Image: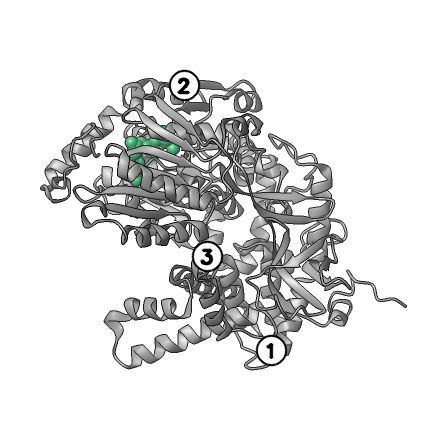
Amino acid sequence: MPSMAQGEPRSSVQNTKPNCSMRQKITEHRKSLPIASVEKRLIEEVRKNDILIIVGETGSGKTTQLPQFLYNAGFCREGKMIGITQPRRIAAVTVAKRVAEECEVQLGQKVGYSIRFDDTTSNVTRLKYMTDGLLLREALLDPHLSRYSVIIVDEAHDRSVHTDVLLALLKKIQRARSKPVGDKSEIGNMALQVQSKTRDENGPQQNGVLRGCQGRKLSPLKLIIMSASLDARVFSEYYGGAKAVHVQGRQFPVDILYTVHPESDYIDAALVTIFQIHMEEKPGDILVFLTGQDEIESVERLVQERLQHLPEDKRKLLPIPIFSALPSEQQMKAFAVAPPGFRKVILATNIAETSITIPGIRYVIDPGFVKARTYDPRKGMESLDVVPASKAQTLQRSGRAGREVPGKCFRLYPEREFEKLEDSTKPEIKRCNLSNIILQLKALGIEDIIGFDFIDKPSSGAIVKALAELHSLGALTDDGKLEDPAGYQMSRLPLEPIYSKALILANQFNCLEEMLITVAVLTVESIFYDPREKREEARTARNHFASVEGDHLTYLSVYRESDEFLEKKKVAGSGNNIDKIMKKWCKENFVNSRSLKHARDIYRQIREHVEQMGFNVSSCGNDMLEFRRCLAASFFLKAAQRQLDGTYRALESGEIVHIHPTSVLFRAKPECVIFDELMQTSKKYIKNLTRIDPLWLAELAPHHFKTAE
Ligand code: CDP
Ligand code: MG
C-alpha cells in the first residue's frame, strides 16, 4: 500500500521489489486493517449466531478479510463455499482479484468471482464473490443454495432491488435448510416446481444440482449481513432481533470546502478543481465522483488535453477511469501505485463511495450528483436520471479523503445546497420497474408477490403494473402463473423481460441474429463515442452508419462493419495487432471501443443461452422490414407517436417526450417510433428509436392495442 505521508515521494520500488517483499507488504497491510484485531470475536459471533449483522466503516477490511477468516476457521469443510454478494459487478471483480492475490492463488482457484456474462469460478472455488443478482439466479437452479455454508450479503445499506429480494429469500432458505429435505417446507416445494421445468430446458447438468440436494440432509446456512452505514436496526428488526456487531474504523479529519456560487457546468468545475489541486496541493491522489461512463470518458480526455498546455514538469497527472462496464483487466489500474512523482486522478461513479476502497486518496471532488433509476408506476415509466446525491452518499464520499491522512473534500456547490439534500437514498425497490424481479420470484415458485416478506414493501400499484406488463409480454397467464414455455424461457435469460421477449419473437420472425446484436448493443452503455467538444465531428462520423429507419439498424451497421473490418484484417494477417487496429478504426469512426468489445462479449454469451434453449440463430438478411416489425412486436409497450406540435406522446403512459439529439431520427421526426430508454435531463428524452408503422401495433400486439371496430 502506498504511503501517504506528506511530502514523502511515492516509491516505484514497490513494483520492482522481489515477491517476498510484496508478500510482506500484503501481510502487514492485512494486519493493519481495523478488522484484523477482532477476527477471533467475529468468528465466535458467527458460530453463535445463525444471522449476524456486521456494520463497519468503509475500508476497515470487511469484504476482503472476513471471508478469509471464515475459510481459515473451517467454514469451507466438505467442499462448501462461502458466497459474498455485491450490488455492483465491479466490486465483485476487483475484490476477488485482491483476495486471490492475498491468498497467493490464481483467480478461479480458491477465490473467484461470478457476474453476469463473466464467470471465473471453478469446482475448487471456495470464496465466491458475485453480484446479488447472480445469486438470485443461482437460486433458480439450486433452490436451497446447498453448496454454500455461509452467505454474506455485503453492502446491504445500498438496498439494491436484488439485495432486498435476496434478504427475504435467504430468510426462507435458511429456515428450509434447518429442516430435512422432503419436508413440506416452502422451499422444498419450490425445488420440485423448478425442477420439473429445468429438466426440459437445461439438460442433465443443471438437473444434477437439483437432484443432488434431494433426499440429502442439508447443513444449516449461516447468514451475514454487512453494511457501511450506522443504522443496523432495520436489518436487525427484519431478522427478528438478530445480533449486530460494529467494527471500529479509523478516520482522519477531512476539510470540507464548498463553492461560493452554484456551478452551471459541474464537469468544467470538476476540471478546474482537478488542476487547482494538482498545481497547489500537497502530494496525494484525487478521487472525482461522476455519474457515468460518458462523463468519465469525457473528463479523462479533457484532463489529457489540458495537460498538454502545462509545462513539461507539471504534466505528472494520471487520469484513471473506473466504472462497471470497464473491461476487468483495466479496472485494477485504479489500485496500482502511480509512477514516481505522478498524481493519480481517479474518475469514478458512485462505486467508489463504499463498494471499493482505492488506497492513496487524499482529495475528493464531489459535484453532488448521481445517476439513479426512477419509476412512476402509474405511467409505467422507468427512467435513468441524473439527480442530486443524498446526504448519506455525500458524507461517504468525503470520508474517502481521510482514510490514511487528513484530507480535503471539494463539494462543487454552495453549503446551503447541502442542507437541501435528502437524508438517504430511497431503496431501489421503491423506484424501479419490478417486472424482472417478479418474473424471477414467480420462477422460484413464489406466487403471492403482494404478501411476500419484503424488507420495504414496494407499492401495490408498482406490483400490479409489473404483473400486467409481464402478462402483456406473454410471460404470465391470465391467473398470474408462468406461461409455458415463454415465461420460463424469459426467466432463464439473464436479461430484462422485454429483451428476452424480443429474442423469443425474433426466433419466430427469423431475425434472431439481428436481435442478438441489437440486445447486446443496447445492454452496453453508448456504442458511439460522443465527446462534448467534438459533437459535430462525431455526428458526421455517425452519419456514415446512419439508417433512415432508426438507431437499432444503425447499431447493426456499426457492429457488422466492425466485424467485416476485423475479418479483413485477420485474413490480411494482422492477428497480433488486432486490438490496436480495431481501436484505431473505432477512433476514426467515433465508436466507443470499450463498449463495442463488451457488446461482442455479451452477444456471444446470449447466443449460447438461446442456442441452449434450442433456438436456431438465423438472419433475415437484408429484409429490414421484418426486423422492424419484430421490434414493434417486442417493444410495443414503448411506442410513441408524433403530435401536431412535433413532440411525441408515449402511448403507454401518455407522457410527452422528445427525441434525444443523439438519435439518428432527431431531425427526421417520423410519425411513430418504438424506443428503448427514457431519460430525464432538462426534458424527458427517448433514446434508441426505430421508425414503425403505427398500424403494426394493433396487428402485432392486438391484445394490447384494440383496433377501433
Ligand atoms: O469492505 P471494507 O470497506 O470494510 O474494506 P475492504 O474492501 O475489505 O478493503 C480493505 C483494504 O483493502 C483497503 O485498505 C483497500 O484499499 C484494500 N484493497 C486494495 O488495496 N485493493 C483492492 N483491490 C481491494 C481492497
Ligand atoms: Mg466492502
For label 2, the crowd category at 10 Å Cα-Cα, with few meaning under 14, some 14 to 19 and many 20 or more, is some
Q: What is the secondary structure assignment of the residue under circle 1?
A: helix
Q: Is residue 129 visible?
A: no
- Marks 3 and 2, the one that precedes in the sequence: 2
Task: Determine which residue is flagged by label 1.
Answer: 624
Residue pictured at 14% horizontal, 32% vertical: 24
Residue nearest the viewer, comparing 603 with 119 = 603
Q: Disc number at residue 246?
A: 2
Q: Is residue 99 left or right of residue 526?
A: left
The percent position of residue 684, horizontal first and vertical second, equals: 65, 52
Residue nearest the viewer, comparing 229 with 53 = 229
The percent position of residue 220, horizontal first and vertical second, equals: 45, 30
Q: Disc number at residue 265?
A: none
Q: What is the secondary structure assignment of the residue under circle 2?
A: strand
- If the image is split into quadrants, where does the N terminus sit? top left
Which tag is nearer the camera, tag 2 or tag 1?
1
Q: Is residue 9 left or right of residue 709?
A: left
For label 1, the crowd category at 10 Å Cα-Cα, with few meaning under 14, some 14 to 19 and many 20 or more, is some
Which tag is nearer the camera, tag 3 or tag 2?
3
Q: What is the secondary structure assignment of the residue under circle 3?
A: helix
Task: Determine which residue is flagged by label 3.
Answer: 532
Coloration of the structure image: one colour
For label 3, the crowd category at 10 Å Cα-Cα, with few meaning under 14, some 14 to 19 and many 20 or more, is few
Q: Is residue 456 left or right of residue 50?
A: right
Residue pictured at 58% horizontal, 44% vertical: 373
Residue pictured at 18% horizontal, 41% vertical: 341
Residue nearest the viewer, comparing 257 with 253 = 257
- Marks 1 and 3, the one that precedes in the sequence: 3
